[in-house]
Image (tube, grey):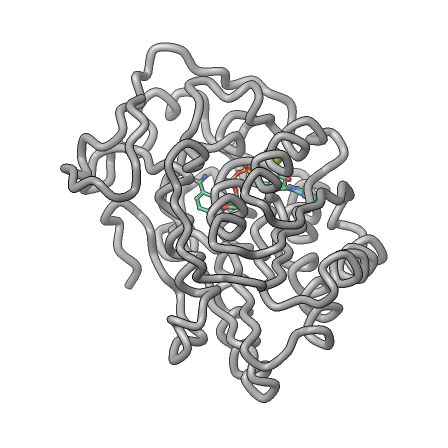
Amino acid sequence: MSKQDQYTMTDPRTQYDNDGTHYNDDQPDPALDKKLDPSADHGENTYRGSDRLKGRKALITGGDSGIGRAVAIAFAREGADVVINYLPSEQEDGDKTVAILEEAGVKAKGIAGDIKDEDFCVSLVEEANTFLDGLDILVNNAGKQKFVENIEDITTEQFRTTFETNVFAMFWIIKAAAKHMPPGGSIINSTSIQCYQPSPGLLDYSSTKGAITSFTKSCAKMLIEKGIRVNGVAPGPIWTPIQQSGGQAPSKLPNFGEDTPIGRAGQPAELAPAYLYLASQESSYVTAEILGVTGGKHLP
Ligand code: NAD
Ligand code: MG
């Protein structure tokens, strides 16, 4: 994979090259960035900030790896103090991300814990609010994705935990966070192309993404009464650990993303500018919107 920056004019079809020769498709859930093979680009070597979030205070779930890590790096280099959340088994990925954020000269902290637990969600928000001395930006990005081909094989436990992780946690975290957020605050939820073009084999996951999209639009209309904007980002196929712990059928990994018009998988670094736009005041007239970053698999 070539590591491109976000600034040089380049043919997007060849900006990154997943070489496709060796894929780790059997990581335990949640998969680690540490073991992601080939590795992903989070902008760590390239992203340049320009004070677009100077002094803001942001909480990002699933910030240890993948899209969340790329968003955290961009926010920190734009001047925001950042708290990330992840599962205890991801401490190493979390520590690595926090170290990159601190290099940007901002305050950063990792808080491990399971967002399927409502009490943890409340304490996460309170701890982040105390550490950051306020909360301006909330990115609900953590997610669970498990590929199961036949409906007979989807357990009730899987169905329930996918909804708890992807939908219930978002509700619990926003409910706890909204009272701390000032007018001008911004909430961004990670939905998916799976909301609009659901694949067989991702029944529970795609359903949660449909729920997140509607939740986002309804919540936007509620929270604008407090001056808070709520939007979503819908990624297409992005090269992250979630794909390597059963998120996709292993047979799909070598050609992952090649069915998009751009013809390749996206990298986490290519998502960060969309989240940044929605977090910053530059998107002041945008709420209840879903921004697709899909390689051309457009939203309806
Ligand atoms: P990722 O594995 O790097 O990130 C997902 C994160 O979710 C994990 O790092 C983990 O910290 C967190 N998480 C999962 N269960 C949790 C729990 N119970 N408690 C706390 N944290 C938990 O993968 P990613 O692709 O960067 O995923 C980020 C978001 O992007 C997810 O919501 C995913 O659905 C969405 N998304 C990804 C793709 C893709 O192709 N990678 C496409 C569309 C949407
Ligand atoms: Mg992770």
Q: Quadrant of the N terminus?
A: top left
Compared with 266, 174 (above or below) is below
Q: Residue furthest top?
A: 21
Q: Nearer the viewer, residue 88 or 156?
A: 88
Q: Position of residue 278 (x, y in %)?
A: 43, 65
In the image, taking residue 10 as reference, residue 175 lies left or right, namely right
Q: Quadrant of ligand 1?
A: top right
Q: Nearer the viewer, residue 122 or 279?
A: 279
Compared with 17, 12 (above or below) is below
Q: Position of residue 198 (x, y in %)?
A: 40, 49
Q: Nearer the viewer, residue 1 or 241?
A: 1
Q: Residue at x 22, y 32 (%)?
A: 15
Q: Residue furthest front?
A: 105
Q: Quadrant of residue 239?
A: top left
In the image, taking residue 8 as reference, residue 76 lies left or right, namely right
Q: Position of residue 210 (x, y in %)?
A: 48, 60
Asked if residue 153 can be seen in this view, the reply is: no
What is the tally of numbered marks visible in this picture?
0
Q: Nearer the viewer, residue 188 or 257?
A: 188
Compared with 38, 233 (above or below) is below
In the image, taking residue 276 as reference, residue 138 lies left or right, namely right
Q: Quadrant of residue 68?
A: top right
Compared with 147, 130 (above or below) is below
In the image, taking residue 111 as reference, residue 189 lies left or right, namely left
Asked if residue 4 can be seen in this view, the reply is: yes
